[in-house]
Image (cartoon, rainbow, N blue to C red):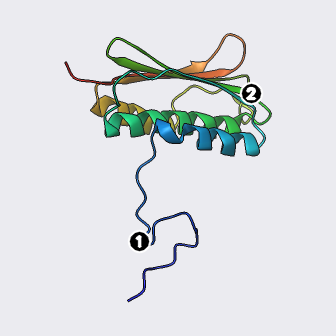
Amino acid sequence: MAAPDTGRPDSPADGLEPQPGLGQLDALIDRVRAAGTPVGVAVSLPPEPLPPGVDLTAYRVVQEALTNTIKHAPGAEAVVTVGWSGDRLEIEVMDTGGVRDGVPADGNGRGLIGLRERLAVYGGELTAGPTLAGGFRIRAEVPWRTV
């Protein structure tokens, strides 16, 4: 029996692809830029590899934040910062948007609620809301290793 055709020459024949992580962040940023949103990026990862679940969660935080910028703040610019301090991975995505869909954003949308739940699994936290400059900021912290 032949393997199913996934329609993409670069995908596995069985359609099972590894979950994304911060190693795929460049590709995500390229797609967002191609959609017309300028994105600045600064990444500094811990010296040890991230656990797969934390790596996926960090990627999903950036993905959701940038998706929200594209969807709710057309024309905004975004900045992605990923760093670490001690045992905590720190992720921040800020944009220059303002009023979204005619109403100020409050940071309590379904996608952000899902991120909060995903982060809580690993002992992490997410804050989101408007900035004083009129943009929007999502900040996540999650332990990246157990002591």
Q: Residue at x 48, y 36 (%)?
A: 22
Point out residue 113 in the picture as x, y percentages from the top left corner: 44, 35
Pick the front one: 103 or 71: 71
Residue at the image point whose x is 40% and y is 21% from the top: 46
Q: Which residue is mark 2?
A: 77
Disc 2: CA contacts within 10 A as few (<14), some (14-19) or many (>=20): many
- Where, quadrant-wise, is the C terminus in this rendering? top left
Q: What's the amino acid at mark 1?
A: Asp
Q: Quadrant of the N terminus?
A: bottom left
Residue type pointed to by label 2: Glu
Q: CA distance from mark 2 to mark 1?
A: 37 Å
Left or right: residue 76 versus residue 11 is right
**In the image, residue 96 above or below residue 7:** above
Q: Position of residue 75 (x, y in %)?
A: 80, 33
Q: Quadrant of residue 63?
A: top right
Query: What residue sits right under mark 1 in the picture?
Result: 14
Q: Nearer the viewer, residue 118 or 55?
A: 55
Residue under the point 41% across and 71% down? 14
